[in-house]
Every structure is written in structure tokens, then in C-alpha cells.
Image (spheres, rainbow, N blue to C red):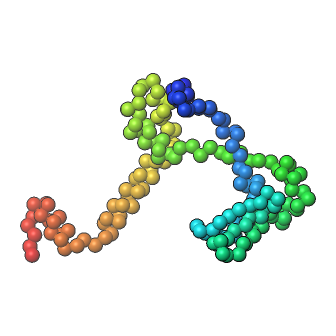
Amino acid sequence: MVQTLNEQPHVTFEAVDASVFFDYGELLDNFYKPFPAGAVQGNHVFWVESTNPTVMFTKETAEEPTIPIQFRNDKVVCREERQQQLKQLPLQSVPAPGMKPIKQVELYTKWRKFVPAEFADEICPKPHDDILKKVQEARSEKNRERNARKKARPMSRREGIMSSRGRGGRASC
């Protein structure tokens, strides 16, 4: 697949190991505050000045006053220790989300027959038995719930007439 992708004129595919992805959001939460509620509106203008990068300025229109929003969080890390803390705090790896179990089962059961045999094990591998069982149980539960809802809803007079005719009986009006 990599070879095929790299044959395209405007594509360069490089495989990347999952170990290079880190949770910077969690790290930066130590240094910066979240956006205040209601601070972001579709018609606002935002900017940050390089001389004061932890303050965002905003205003709704050119006539409105400028509102500064301070994002530096001095409660967790004080200003003097920010540089040192940034270097020392460990980054946590972001786990690969993988494919949802139902999609794994669908690839195997519905699409594998369309994939050339030589690629089938790579593109549509058989999911682990636990995954197959879990998806089957989820489908069964969903069917049970749907059938229970059908039985619980009251039948209209028209549905009663139609169902009795469907069984060969005559409906009386």
C-alpha cells in the first residue's frame, strides 16, 4: 500500500510510529487557563501580540472596546518557574484509538469477499473472538429493545384491520 501511495505524483507517504504522538493538551493545561464561558462568539475579532503572548485581545466590532483575556495560569506554575517546569514535565503518549469493534466485524463479514485474497488478511483481518462475541451481543440487545418497543406501542384500528386481513381472516367494521 505504501508503495502504491508513493507512486502518486503529489503524495509522499511516510509511516509514523504511534510513539511520536503526545498529549500536549494535558501538559499545557498546567500553564494556561481555558477560554472563559461566552468569550468566543462567531462575530468576534481575535489577536495576540508577540510582546505579550499569553494575552488574547478580542472585540465584537470595530466600535466596541477591546477586551483583554489573560490565559497564563499562575496558580499551577508560577511565572519564574515556567521555563524550567516546561522542560521537566513529562509528556504522556496518546494511545492509538484503533478501529471501533463494529467496523472491524463489518470489514471482515461484509467486505472481505471483495478484497483480493492476497490482501484480505491485511485489509480485512478476522477480529478476535471476544470482539465478534461483543458485537453480536450488542446487535442482539438492540434487536430485543426494538422488538420490545414494537410490542409496547398500542396498535391503531387500521393496523388491526390490516393484520387480520393479512392472516386470511375478514375484518368486520
x 65%, y 66%: residue: 45
Residue 3, given in percent of the width and then of the height, sits at: 54, 25
Q: Residue furthest right?
A: 80
Q: Quadrant of the C terminus?
A: bottom left
x 10%, y 69%: residue: 171
Q: Where, by quadrant of the figure, is residue 70 drawn?
A: bottom right
- Horizontally, residue 35 falls left or right of residue 166, namely right
Residue 84, given in percent of the width and then of the height, sits at: 89, 51
Residue 25, given in percent of the width and then of the height, sits at: 71, 54
Q: Where, by quadrant of the figure, is residue 57 drawn?
A: bottom right
Asked if residue 62 is positioned above or below residue 18 in the image, the reply reads below
Asked if residue 132 is positioned above or below residue 138 in the image, the reply reads above
Of residues 134 and 114, the one drawn nearer to the viewer in this rendering: 114
Of residues 10 and 39, the one drawn nearer to the viewer in this rendering: 10
Residue 9 visible from this viewpoint: yes
- Horizontally, residue 16 falls left or right of residue 99, namely right
Asked if residue 48 is positioned above or below residue 156 in the image, the reply reads above
x 46%, y 34%: residue: 124
x 31%, y 66%: residue: 151
Of residues 107 and 32, the one drawn nearer to the viewer in this rendering: 32
Residue 122, given in percent of the width and then of the height, sits at: 50, 30
Residue 132 visible from this viewpoint: no
